[in-house]
Image: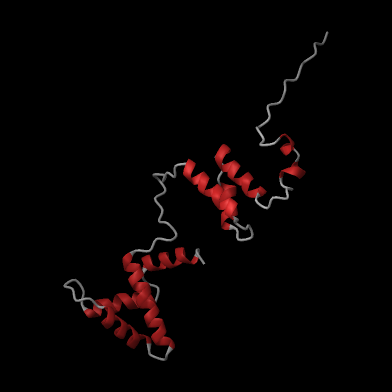
């Protein structure tokens, strides 16, 4: 004789509204921020921040003042913790040395655009920016500037690569 097996109720994840189970209503709202709210909810409740990061980096999604307020609220409520194994440099960070080389590089590029040779432009700019110190001679400053202009300075290449992400 067979016994009837009862199936238990399936546990549902909590939705903000009872009608949110219907897919056509979930992303079909008159509010243009509806998708943003779902991404904030995913980051807040489930800890899944990848969709939010993708939306923030994608230019096709407009960020309204309400979305900015929600993002500020999310960042206020959560502590940003740097992971110990991922000590990465922020996109916007530029060292003092690299900023000086960027300024000198721009001056050299202006001079070479006006017809001055690169070697002469490097000499002029190095003489203008050269600080009298015991560490470096003028030739060292010219060599370092030439390396920065020709892409042989690693820190400057990495900085330019990070700054290119901001454009």
Q: Position of residue 46 (x, y in %)?
A: 57, 38
The residue shown at (22%, 76%) is 131
Above-or-below relation of 106 to 38: below
117 vs 67, left or right, is left
The residue shown at (71%, 47%) is 27
Q: Position of residue 126 (x, y in %)?
A: 29, 80
The residue shown at (42%, 56%) is 90
Q: Position of residue 63 (x, y in %)?
A: 59, 56
For the N terminus, which image quadrant? top right
81 vs 139, left or right, is right
Q: Nearer the viewer, residue 164 or 62?
A: 62
Q: Nearer the viewer, residue 78 or 111?
A: 78
| Residue 12 lies in quadrant | top right
The residue shown at (39%, 60%) is 93
| Residue 134 lies in quadrant | bottom left
Q: Position of residue 129 (x, y in %)?
A: 28, 78
Above-or-below relation of 133 to 90: below
> How many discs mark residues in the rendered view?
0
Q: In the image as oriented, which residue stretches furthest toward the right?
A: 1
90 vs 44, left or right, is left
Q: What colouring does the structure picture have?
A: secondary structure
Above-or-below relation of 139 to 74: below
Q: In the image as oriented, which residue stretches furthest toward the top?
A: 1
């Amino acid at each position: 004789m067979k016994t009837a097996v009862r199936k238990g109720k399936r546990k549902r994840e909590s939705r903000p509204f009872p009608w949110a189970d219907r897919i056509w209503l979930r992303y079909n709202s008159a509010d243009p921020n509806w998708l943003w709210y779902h991404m904030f909810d995913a980051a807040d409740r489930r800890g899944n921040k990848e969709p939010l990061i993708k939306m923030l980096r994608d230019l096709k999604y407009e960020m309204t003042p309400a979305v900015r307020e929600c993002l500020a609220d999310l960042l206020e409520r959560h502590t940003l913790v740097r992971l110990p194994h991922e000590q990465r440099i922020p996109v916007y960070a530029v060292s003092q040395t690299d900023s000086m080389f960027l300024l000198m590089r721009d001056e050299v590029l202006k001079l070479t655009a006006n017809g001055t040779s690169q070697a002469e432009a490097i000499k002029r700019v190095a003489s203008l920016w050269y600080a009298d110190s015991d560490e470096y001679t003028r030739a060292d400053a010219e060599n370092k500037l030439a390396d920065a202009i020709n892409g042989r300075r690693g820190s400057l290449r990495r900085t330019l690569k990070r700054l290119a992400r901001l454009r």
